[in-house]
Amino acid sequence: MALAPAARVALLQALTRGRDIPTTLQTRPAVGRMGHQTTAAFRGLQVEELQMCSETEAELATDSACEAAQAWVPVRLVKQAVAQGRLPVVVLLHATGTDKDSLATQQAHFARRGYLAAAIDCRYHGDRAAVGEGCWEGYQQALVRAWRGSGELPFLLDNVWDLLRLLDLLQSRPDVEPGRIGMTGVSLGGMHTWLTAAADERVAAAAPMIGVQNFGWAVEQQRYHARVGSIPHVFQAAAAEAIEQLDPELPHQAPQAAGGEAQISADVVKAVWDRLLPGLLEHYDAPMSLPLLAPRPLLIANGELDPRCPMEGVHLAMEAVQAAYERQGSLDKLQLYVVPDCEHQSTDCMRTLREHTFLHISVNFDRASANTSETQAMRRHTRTAFVVAALALLVAMVAPAAEASRQGRVLLQADAPAPAPGPATEEAAAPSGGEAPSSGDPFAISACGIRNELCGASTPNGMGCCPPLVCVQVVADFPETSTTSNRCVSPSSP
């Protein structure tokens, strides 16, 4: 029996921390209620709401009331009302400060295309938000408590633990094809996707959106400020404590910044990561854990100017990832897409490519199911969407070259292979439980350039290569800065 890779062993040790895996998953009816917009998104679909306990009874008996409440994971499962037999699954994961309601449009989209679409509320989000605290503030305070030794690790690791239990639940269901489970998420959800797929090979395809980053590189190069700004409270608390009392983990005291706040140094950032993500920097950061996904389909999509996931660090990690896929002869299943001029934002381009990635676990995954009515229907839908997308692309190609030049957009790269068609996907996930603004025609093509960083002029077209595709709107990921941006919208945008 082959030994597990060291990065996976270290990641699993950080996830378990001595916890036992529940031998029998407890479930109970969900207590939360869907809002009007969420209910409307699921019209005509079958929706199942439940809570799943991710901890054992013994751990629930010893944990605090707050921790015990976090052990119950709200799960929403959506599929076609007429669906029969075992279905491929897509697990959708939300961003910081939002919840599973923000994924309603996306869940409905995948369900109508023949998947069972699953979503959860991460710890201290949605139905798991602390009583008396808003989602954002409650989550921030939970991270501060974790820094001070609460025993919880609610930034990434405890949520990945919950997702491993979700995989247990899904594989036990009679309506799930156990070997056809894909996972995707945005920002925080992208980080969850990356680490869950690295920890567990039951994730058959993964598409982390604006979530992959190189934590160690960011500390060394002092490019951590934007990531720190997404969860500021815990870093402020750590920096303040470094001033009050020199911690052995902090070799240099943090100086005072303007206004009296403690300045957050690289030493402080490293100490926080060491406590909230024990072993990450040494054993399961992106360069070490992302290669574990080979040879499974993997799409990594980032903005070129994303300050939270700097592309310089991502490129260094991708050297190891690409080598792993080359060793296994599966480079055609690896995609790194970078949207020019975009920051920490999820675009329609990314979601189109994500759906193309998940075709591996739907239409193309299991030849034995090729004659089922479910698969035939999905094939018909996919062919139709491809034709519509291709026609729309032709419309974009005839846009005046002068106008495109004025806006600084690249309509088509001269040395790129022919574009791989792909159905445009749903609207972007909206913050605070609402639905994102509609982008109009779901198959509209505009002239946002999106490039595959792993492609060359001689690379065959297919999973590995796709030049400029769909980009209709860009929606900022985090609720506190939720805006619709005009970047990457169309060559006629101001």
Image (cartoon, rainbow, N blue to C red):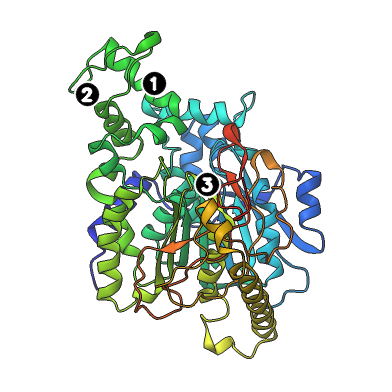
x 46%, y 78%: residue: 462
Q: Is residue 41 visible?
A: yes
Which type of secondary structure does the marked residue at label 3 adopt?
strand
Residue 282 point in image, percent of width and height: 22, 45
Compared with residue 183, is residue 329 higher up or lower down, i.e. above or below? below
Numbered circle sitting on residue 250: 2
Which type of secondary structure does the marked residue at label 1 adopt?
helix
Q: Is residue 211 left or right of residue 291?
A: right
Instruction: Give the residue at mark 3.
Output: 345
Alpha carbon separation for disc pair 2 and 3: 33 Å
Q: Nearer the viewer, mark 2 or mark 3?
A: 3
Give the residue type that dot 1 points to: Gln
**Looking at the image, which residue sits at the far front?**
402
x 50%, y 69%: residue: 357
2 or 3: tag closer to the N-terminus: 2
Residue 395 point in image, percent of width and height: 65, 70
Give the residue type that dot 3 points to: Gln
Report if the CB atoms under discs 1 and 3 are less than 8 Å apart. Answer: no
Instruction: Give the residue at mark 1.
Output: 236
